[in-house]
Amino acid sequence: MAEELLSVGIDIGTSTTQLVISRLTLENRANPFSVPRISIAKREVCYRSGIHFTPLRSDTVIDAEGVRAIVAEEYEKSGFSREDVSTGAVIITGETARKENAREVLRALSAFAGDFVVATAGPDLESILAARGAGADEYARENHCKVLHFDIGGGTSNLSLYDRGELAATGCLNVGGRLIKLERESGAVTYVSPVLRRLGERGWCPVPAVGERVGPEELAPVVQIMVEALEQAALLRPGTDRLEHFKTEGTRWEPVQAPVLSFSGGVADCIYDPQGDWRAYGDIGVLLGRAIRDSAAFRSVRLRRGAETIRATVVGAGSHSTDLSGSTIFYRGVEFPLKNLPILKLTEEEERGSAADLEGALRAKLGWFADEGGLTQTALALRGSKNPEYRRVKELAQGVCRGLEPLCQEGFFPVLVVEADMAKVLGQAMAPLLEGPLLCLDGVGVDNGDYIDVGAPIANGAVLPVVIKTLVFNKG
């Protein structure tokens, strides 16, 4: 029998703030005599907010109350309340994630978040959600090809490569339409991003100063270098100098070629439906869109307009941020939801070790998650195996329980995230060895540096909603 739940996506971007509410339909796809395998069978957007300019108090401070007022207004218009919402994500993207009070904004939205909506920021997750919201993953799967997706917003361009539907790479560049802002009437520059100011310092091109009146001719060199960075990312231009200059901190993107390029984000609308007035949005977004459209390098490959453009990230946040764990889960005494648990993942060699080896590896690595106040609640990630022998399950349970003993002494409890469907038998083996809460999830692949949120059980307790995320606020 199908079950439905509501998911909200809130995207606070460099240019715009938006909200969508989606309906997710859950179905058990296993036969009646098998272990239940519940999955999300359908995702449907049932409410789209208006597109609001993100309110700012200054170049470095978001207007938290202004954002809160926008979300409150859209909740009221939607006809849904926070109690109706079961899952979802709040995403702070692009240059907005660098603002001084980004976390304050997330706290201001907590009243609308419901019990499970998560606050996330991080270019890898943004890239994935934007690509999925725009349908790039489905296109790559259906057409058995590689698709390189660009989500070009106000502050950043999120890149993701899908190979026949599977995610192959993600990255983020400081390329966006609002890296230069100007007065619509006079054309006087009111803001220049530090990443663009450094172009002038490197002698690549003249960069306008705040207060200077400019036209398309004066802005063309800056815009052209931004386009060249995108071309180098797609192996359409030799070299990597432009690409390296615009990479955001921590991005691992290497130039990659694909037969299909897909575009979303506000600038995508300026590629396919350019405004006649280049100052229409008080920034360089229209000029950037035109330059991409006119690029001979980009015209040499197939260009695909995303199924969603300016709404791609928020649709992805509302419809694609949540996965399910539920073939063989085990939980006891857990108060849901669990939020922002950092992942500790052992190496494959450490995981295969004896109980004593496991204990030693865990105790050593728990120190990664200690601060002046002691240890913090952590989720242990294991690969597991499809058909483990009972002897191995028992050995694994003993090693994990002993290794996590310092965590339990701090008042926390074991949370295990296992890729293979063996969480139930592992939880049953661990249960007699320790007291108090215990949680073992299955079918979830994570890595060190990820965070995980786990929602309250649904589908008569057979399934736990899970969001895997990066919680990284970019530094300028």
Image (cartoon, rainbow, N blue to C red):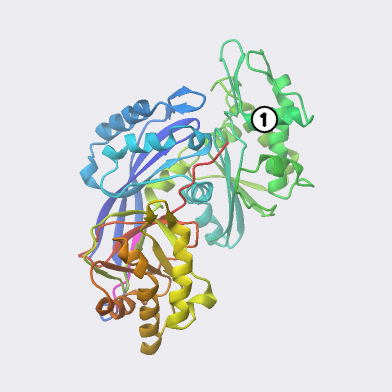
Residue at 35% across, 62% down: 324
Q: Amino acid at mark 1?
A: Leu
| 50 in magenta | no
Residue at image mark 1: 196
Q: Identify the residue at the far top of this view.
A: 186
In the rendered image, residue 49, in percent from the top left (x then y), is placed at: 35, 34
Query: Measured from the top left, where is residue 284 in percent x and y?
Result: 61, 26
**Is residue 298 visible to the viewer in this orientation of the structure?**
no
Quarter that holds the C terminus: top right
On screen, residue 156 versus residue 212, left or right, reads left
Quadrant of res 62:
top left
Location of residue 120 in the rendering, given as x and y in whole percent from the top left corner: 42, 46
State left or right for residue 235 relative to residue 323. Answer: right
Q: Position of residue 271 (x, y in %)?
A: 60, 34
Q: Is residue 461 above or below residue 225?
A: below
Element at badge 1?
Answer: helix
The quarter of the picture where the N terminus appears is bottom left
Which of 461 and 105 lies nearest the eye of the viewer? 105
* Crowding near the residue tagged with mark 1, few <14, some 14–19, many ≥20 C-alpha atoms within 10 Å: many
Q: Nearer the viewer, residue 468 or 61?
A: 61
* Residue positioned 52% across, 56% down in the render: 137
Q: Which residues are magenta?
A: 35-41
- Please report the residue visible at 54 percent of the width from the left and 36 percent of the height from the top: 153
The answer to if 39 sits in the magenta stretch is yes
